[in-house]
Each structure stands twice: as C-alpha cells, then as structure tokens.
Amino acid sequence: MTPDAPDDPRVVPFDDETTQVLLLRRWVSRILRAGALASGILLLAGIVAHALSAGPALLIPPARLDPDQVAQAFERPSAAGVVLVAVLVLALTPLTRVILSAGIFARSRDRPMLAITAFVLAMLALTILGGVAF
Amino acid sequence: MTPLVDLGGGGSTVLLLLLLVAIGFASGLLGSLIGIGGGLFLVPTLVLGFGLDIHFAVAASLLAVIANSSGSASTYVEQGLTNLRLGMFLETTTVIGGLLGALLSVTVLASHSDVLALGFVPAVVVGAILMFRAPRAGPDPDAPSSPLADRLDLGGEYEDEETGARIRYRTNHPAEGLSLAGVAGFGSGLLGVGGGIFNVPAMNAVMNVPLRIASATSLFMIGVTASAGVLVYFLAGDLLLFVAAPVAFGSLLGSVVGSYYQFHAGSRWIRAMFIVVLLVAAVLMAARGVGYLQ
C-alpha cells in the first residue's frame, strides 16, 4: 500500500487546515534545528582548526562565493574550507525551509500561500543567480 | 591577489576568536530574549571595538542574525509561538527590502563607509525609541477585520500566560504591515540589523499581533531577510570568514540559551540596559561617521 492510499490509516487528511499548520511546525522546526546544528558543528571545527594553525595576528582573507573555492573545500579540507561550507549551510537554511513550506502548501493546495512562498523563493534564487553572474 | 585584513593589531588569534565568539553570544542572547536579531549591538561593536570597515561588520552581523534566527526560531516554531503564515506573508517585502539594502551598500555605498556609519545612527535611535515605548501584550478584541488577512488566515491563537486560556486573535492592516516589513528588510540589508526592532512593533501595534507571537514570528522572519542580504555581501567579497564564523557561532549559542528563557527578559531592566548601549553606540557611530573617531 502506498502512503497516499486513501484507506491507509497513516494518511493525514490534507484538507484539514490544522494538519497543515502542524506539519509546517514540525518540519520547519526540524529544518531550522538541523541547519543550526550542522552549521554549528562545522563552524566550531573550522574555528578550532584556524585557532590551532594561525599565527599571532589574525589575518583574514575576505571570502567570495566562488564555486571553485567551494569545490576545493571538499577536495582539500582546510579551516577556511570548513568555515566556508558552514557559512553556506547557515545561509541556505532559511532558503531550505522556504522550499519545504512551499511543498507543504502545494500538497495542501493552499494556492495563495504557495504563491507567497514561491515569490520569496524566486527572490532568493534571483539573488544567488544574479550574484554569480555579476 | 587576495587582500588581507589585519584585525586586532598583533593580538593573539585565539583571544580574538574567543572575543568574537563572546560578542556573538551576547548579541544572540539579547536578540533571542528581546525578539530581535542582535545586529544593532553587533555592528557598532565590530566597527568601534575592532576597527572593521562597516561593510565587513554588516556582512558578519547578517550571518549572526541567521544563526540567531535558526537557533531560536526552531524552538518557538515547535512550541507554536510563531505565526508561520503571517511570517511568510511579511517575508515577501522584507526579502525585497533586504536585497535592495544590501545591493545599495555593495554598489553605490561601496566606498562610502562613513555614510553607512551615519545611516546607522537614526536606525539605532529609532530602535531605542521603539524599545522604550510600552508594547501591547494582548490583542485588541475590537480590532477591525481585514478581508485580505482573513482570506489568508493570518490570525491565530495563543495561550495567555496568566490564565492559561487559549485566545484567538485576528490580524488587520496587512498592507501597512507589509510596508513596514519592507522598510525593516531594507534596514537589515543596508545596516546588518535583523529588523526585529521594527518588525515587532509593526506587528504588535499595527497588525494587532500579541507581543510574544510578534517576537517569535519576527525571529522566524529575520533569517530569510538576512539570508538574502548576506548572499549579496558574500558574492561581493565582503564576508570575512574568520570574523563572521566566530560571531555566528557565538550568536547561535546565545540564541539557544535565550530561547530557553523565552522572552522572560523582555523585562524592563534588560530593555533599559539595551537602550543605553544603543544610544552610546549611536553617539560613537556618529563620531566615526564624521571622522572624529577612527
């Protein structure tokens, strides 16, 4: 039996507005918590690695969101690479929860709220695409 | 060649990193307790205390705001304190405002840090005034209805702290709320503040949202607003990794601790202390903006 089958007792009635709110609460809080936890661990690891490796003065290269740099961070892990990934995880956590919310609104056929979240999503996507092109 | 920024004039790296974590922690704690992002405290501290260019301070602050939002909003969302539909509705204009503010900062004002520093002053003063005024704890039961707010179901219910009763509230003036949220978003992108200091009074006083719900909803919203802004600064090369990282980490820790206490310290003495800090910061930022302070 598929989870979407109407006679499946596990199926949540999606036309129930309260169910939508409860789903939103559950998943949004999980996404935010996961993003905070993952980025927190990565930030701590990167900061400790930097503290152990850096010289007496804190010389800091400004970072750019460069796809090559991100790829390098995975290939050759360094303190800066770990922090870069942490920053990306943190910065993209709100975006992820907007995507998730849009999905929940789409499933519950809540068109006005779907349009609202899609608009926010489009603005964030535009920022990333516009910035990379720039 | 990658330009380098010497922060701290020869101070020990570990000490500087710890200091930045501590500052982030303080801003995250305060922000989570009061329902704001903490940028109003962070940006002046980084500019005046560490001699950072305000663009770098704003970028680091925005990352800390996201950390604060993610850390504390997860708790408030789970507990049902956050009005998710209202937050997402208001995010439409805060995101646009955040984008425009950040774009203005990294283009037109890229080489005008003094102007940005001066721009911070009215934001801080308005923020202090808004914090000073007594908020309305509960919703107005006689508030007029709004067809748009009703259609989008932007109202909700909350548990009264004294009686334990669940009270329904309806929101109104959505257009005004959207406009004010857009202004808050613009301030966020331009000056690195979360915008909560404007969002909370806007929701509370204009849209008839109970104070605790407004604070939790604002903390939820500012993550998306700051995300739009920080991506712009990041793409412009204004994000100093090892300034932003410890500040964001500290802010994350502070927000988790703050959300445990749940706005209890919305109490007068913390607000009063914060207002004094803000006003001192405003004076120092003004001095920096006009060149009296380097």
Image: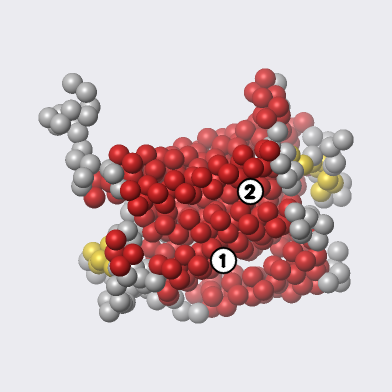
- Residue positioned 46% across, 79% down in the render: B134
Q: Nearer the viewer, residue B257 or B241?
A: B241
Among the two numbered marks 2 and 1 on one chain, the one whose residue lies closer to the N terminus: 1
**Number of the label disc, if any, that sits on residue A118:** none
Which quarter of the rendered picture does the C terminus of chain B lie within? bottom right
**Crowd rating for badge 2 (residues with CA inside 10 Å; few <14, some 14–19, many 20+):** many
Task: Name the residue tied to disc 1.
Answer: B183
**Does residue B116 lie above or below B237 as drawn?**
below
Helix, strand or loop status at disc 2: helix
Q: Quadrant of residue B147?
A: bottom left
Task: Name the residue tied to disc 2.
Answer: B230
x, y percentage for residue B81? 36, 57
User: Farthest residue in the left direction?
Assistant: A7
x, y percentage for residue B221? 48, 55
- Residue positioned 34% across, 68% down in the render: B171
Determine the chain carrying the residue at label 2.
Answer: B
- Residue positioned 70% across, 24% down in the render: A72
